[in-house]
Image (tube, helix red, strand yellow):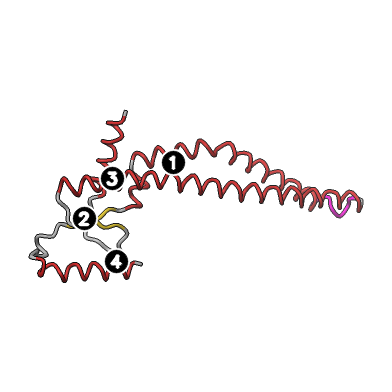
Amino acid sequence: MKRTIATLLGVLLAALPFAGISAAELKVGYVNTQRLFRDAPAAVKAAKKIEQEFSKRDQDLQRLAKQVQGLQESLEKGGPTMAESERRAKEKDLAELSREFQRKQREFREDLNLRQNEENAAIIEKANKAIKQLADSERYDLIVQDVVWVSPRLDITDKVIKALSESRDAAK
């Protein structure tokens, strides 16, 4: 994918002289999506919202993990001196509790990933609108994301974050 983008960019730059545009006239910008997800006000708000949504389930998981650990330790310490039937019952309880913990942990991770992806999609949608408006207002010919290397002078991420902040403030 990156090779295809690099090839297309190379072809575009090679075709510019034929289109009557010199490379000096080409205005290019770069947006760092990782910084958007980390620093944009909508991203910060989404992270707090998700943390709040999932904190109770996380605490429940931690409690369940402690139960599993406690039962495991109890079985390891007292197992050799326990009656066979009591030891088997504790091993069965431990296995059931461990399965329940793993199931809940897996569901938690899946639900958390799903919510993060939903919030990230909303952030990207807002960012793309802000980037389009910035491109129109400042007459950019090309704005790229996810590149191997870019000169810091082409980085317009701060402008996009500022535009996202202003659009959020205007929405209040």
- Please state which amino acid type lies under the numbered disc 4: Ile
Q: Which residue is mark 2?
A: 29
Q: Which residue is mark 3?
A: 129
10 Å crowding of disc 3: few (<14), some (14-19), many (20+): some
1 vs 3, front mark: 3
Taking depth in this image into account, of 37 and 8 the one nearest to the observer is 8
For the residues labelled 1 and 3, the Cα–Cα distance comes to 21 Å
Q: Which residue is mark 1?
A: 47
Mark with earlier residue (2, 3): 2
Residue 118 x, y percent position in the rendering: 45, 45
Marks 2 and 4 in Cβ contact (< 8 Å): no
For the residues labelled 4 and 1, the Cα–Cα distance comes to 31 Å
Mark with earlier residue (3, 4): 4
Our reading of the magenta stretch's main secondary structure is helix
Circle 4: element type? helix
Circle 1: element type? helix
For the residues labelled 2 and 3, the Cα–Cα distance comes to 15 Å
In the image, is 47 to the left or to the right of 68?
left
Image quadrant in which you'd find residue 70: top right
Residue 94 x, y percent position in the rendering: 77, 50
Query: Which stretch appears magenta?
Result: 77-82
Q: Which residue is mark 4?
A: 5
